[in-house]
Image: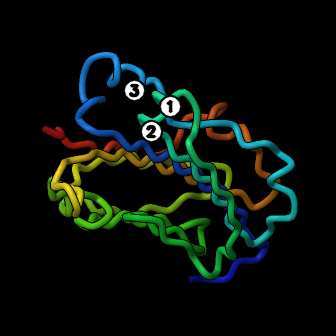
Amino acid sequence: MIPQDPPVRGLMQVIHLHWTKASRGGKGASVRSAVPLAFEIPDDRLLEIDGQLRVEEQHWGERNAFAEPLRHRQRQVAVADGFKLGCVTVGGHAQGLSVRYRWDATHGGAPDRSFLDRDLIVPPGQWLRICSNGRFSDADTGEWYYEQVTVNVACSAGGVSGRIFVDQAPAHDLRLLADLW
């Protein structure tokens, strides 16, 4: 990772959906598909993040019919240290933030999409979205379950607004979605 002057600020939002075949079609799929791909992050969570990457994760699922997040997690890491979550790695770059997508079966599920691997740069004032999905097999039951992960990454060399993901279109919008049968 490359140090920066002035230090960049990063904002990473992860929206993780988890479902079984009960929500593959019909009403379950409609409700699941209604979960937004981006949310506002309260500005008070963005204080003093120079040189930091603020990570906000939401986990949604069938247990409450996708009515609200089942879990919410917040953390902050140094941009210089980088951060990896599933198939996505974010770190510092001389021009802003480096975002790398590398498919692997453990995190990305089936089918194989390694041919979709990407390396992108997010300059200050912009953001990008990577949305991917996968089919997995439960180790205990053998039953299939499905996941969709949306990762939004914004970069700023000054103040960053918690509304960037809802007020501004992404500079890159990668939809790495497969047909999950």
- Left or right of residue 75: residue 176: left
Q: CA distance from mark 2 to mark 3?
A: 11 Å
* Label 2 packing within 10 angstroms: few (<14), some (14-19), many (20+): many
The amino acid beneath tag 2 is: Gly
Q: Is residue 33 above or below residue 85?
A: above
Residue 68 placement (x, y as % from top left): 58, 32
Discs 1, 2 touching: Cβ within 8 Å: yes
Which residue corresponds to mark 2? Answer: 61
Front position among marks 2 and 3: 2
What residue is shown at x 80% (from left), y 54% (from top)?
46
Which residue is situated farthest in the top direction here?
27
Residue 55 placement (x, y as % from top left): 64, 59
Q: Quadrant of the C terminus?
A: top left
Front position among marks 1 and 3: 1
Q: Which of the labelled discs sits on residue 169, or is there none? A: none
Q: Is residue 180 above or below residue 11?
A: above
The amino acid beneath tag 1 is: Asn
Tag 2, which secondary structure?
strand
Q: Which of the labelled discs sits on residue 64, or is there none? A: 1
Tag 1, which secondary structure?
helix
What residue is shown at x 30% (from left), y 29% (from top)?
23
Which residue corresponds to mark 3? Answer: 33
Quarter of the view holding residue 30: top left
The amino acid beneath tag 3 is: Ser
Residue 73 placement (x, y as % from top left): 64, 56
